[in-house]
Amino acid sequence: MKSNLLFILFFISLYAFGQTTEMPSDFLSKDFHKERRQKLREKLPANSVAVFFANAVRNRANDVDYVYHQDPNFYYLSGYKEPNAVLFIFKEKQTAANGTKYDEIVFVQPRNELAEMWTGRRLGESGVKAQLGLEQSFNNTEFKKYNIDFSKFDQILFTDFENDVRNDPRDSSDLYDLIDQFKVKVNYPSKNKSLSVNPEPPMNNLNTKDLHGLMGMLRGIKTKEELALVRKAVSISCAGQIEVMKAMKPGMSEREIQGIHEFVFKKYQAEDLGYPSIVGAGHNGCILHYIDNYKPEITSKEMILMDLGAEYRGYTADITRTIPVNGKFSPEQKQIYELVLKAQEEAMKICKPGATFQQLTETTKVVINKGLKDLGIIKTEDERHRYYPHGCCHHIGLDVHDNGQRDMLRENMVITIEPGIYIPENANCDKRWWGIAVRIEDDYLITKDGYDHLSAAAPRKPDEIEALMKLPSPLDAFVLPSLDNKK
């Protein structure tokens, strides 16, 4: 028993003190995050504090959790990628009990050699100071007893908590308890009776409405550092679309096509997906957020809609291409495809600072409704229908539907333009159109005078797609041995 204990302790010490890992060099710098905190501080109202909690750990099943993903606001402001933390940004300088002046403070999960052996390294308070530059950093075990007089602030800005945060009864300073302790400090009224909330009336300075908009003003306009990461995510995602176009053959499955995309993402060091991959063949493409990707065999008469985005250093692309499985658009497929393409290109013509999101959407709807009427799919151009049920534009960045102002376009915003037409089986039109679903989605950087088409490398025009699909693929020689044990 003693030798086993010594063995365990040896490897704990080896992991905690002797193991090194080479990390990528293109993460956002601590200076970037510091500057973002200052920009937010400048926008905060007088005598206020903004409060940010890390994302919760989400349980997948039993004792397995989903891969952790930090809250985008928390990451944007700190660079911290671990759970069980809370960040405070003050408008004015505060004075600690020892006389120290500060305008930001963070409480993070402490180092734990045994836990780190199982789930990976933690920065701890000293690591946050050294690597992220947050000088007022403390272990989250200190938060409960840390004296912050919230009653003195005119506003306490934060996002409401009613979500699915779980309590780990073994950890009295996990996210659940940090939220609980904050609620006690501010007399927060909670619908969750399991949380210990003061019987006192809530403070009248609680503001759960304005922080989202303030963060949108910041996150919607990308910095030079952010744009470099967005461009890389877009470039990787374009490479995935290109390789699938070359590899596509009738008889492949939706899941196989998904796998090719995601293999390319990993090959070029994308850490994650920006959102669940959408790969829908035939009528499955009519489900806007179809993520089952189960269809085992795609027929030669179908098209396949592929909406995927690589996430690189936290920033995601969002690109959709729709291609004919057999490499050649049928007349009906081509007519619908070219109508969607025309709608996108008309929106691109007005894509510049000062244009509104609504103008872009209305431009695409006018083109699509006229085209559907000309094809006899709808009777009048103002007919209500579900063949184009969504808007055409949104911000991208740390979220696929990123936080940002949605009134008008501004320089250094990054947006999508994504018109689509979806005609399901049994639609109220000639059956030759049934099962045709087309979405074309591209990513654009708004420049001073117009836009930069970031995802132009992935072909959009029918003749370009058909030409690329004739090229050989490195996957053509990949043959999997039979899995059904038949001889």
Image: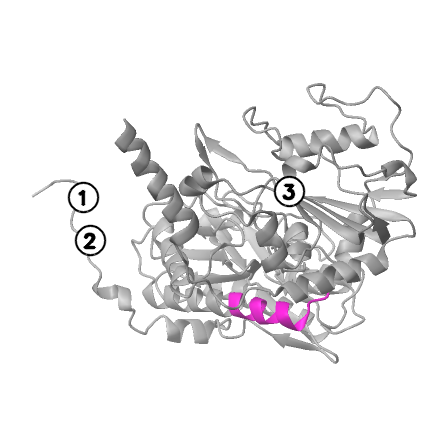
Element under label 3?
A: loop
Q: Position of residue 278 (x, y in %)?
A: 48, 51
Marking on residue 480: 2
Q: Position of residue 308 (x, y in %)?
A: 49, 57
Q: Residue at x 77, y 25 (%)?
A: 190
Main secondary-structure element of the magenta-colored stretch: helix
Q: Which residues are magenta?
A: 220-233
Element under label 2?
A: loop
Marking on residue 16: none
Q: Position of residue 177 (x, y in %)?
A: 66, 30
Q: Is residue 408 left or right of residue 443?
A: right
Neighbour tally class for label 2: few under 14, some 14-19, many 20 plus, Cα within 10 Å: few
Discs 3/2, front? 3
Report the amino acid beneath label 3: Ala
Report the amino acid beneath label 1: Leu
Query: Is residue 453 shown in magenta?
Result: no
- How many angstroms separate mark 2 from mark 1 (CA)? 8 Å
Discs 3/1, front? 3
Q: Earlier in the sequence, mark 3 or mark 1?
A: 3
Q: Is residue 258 shown to the viewer in this render?
A: yes
Quarter that holds the N terminus: top left
Marking on residue 483: 1
Neighbour tally class for label 1: few under 14, some 14-19, many 20 plus, Cα within 10 Å: few
Q: Is residue 80 shown to the viewer in this render?
A: no
The residue that disc 3 covers is 85
Q: Is residue 99 left or right of residue 175?
A: right
Q: Earlier in the sequence, mark 3 or mark 2?
A: 3
Report the amino acid beneath label 2: Leu
Q: Are marks 3 and 1 in contact (CB under 8 Å)?
A: no
- How many angstroms separate mark 3 from mark 2 (CA)? 46 Å
Q: Are marks 2 and 1 in contact (CB under 8 Å)?
A: yes
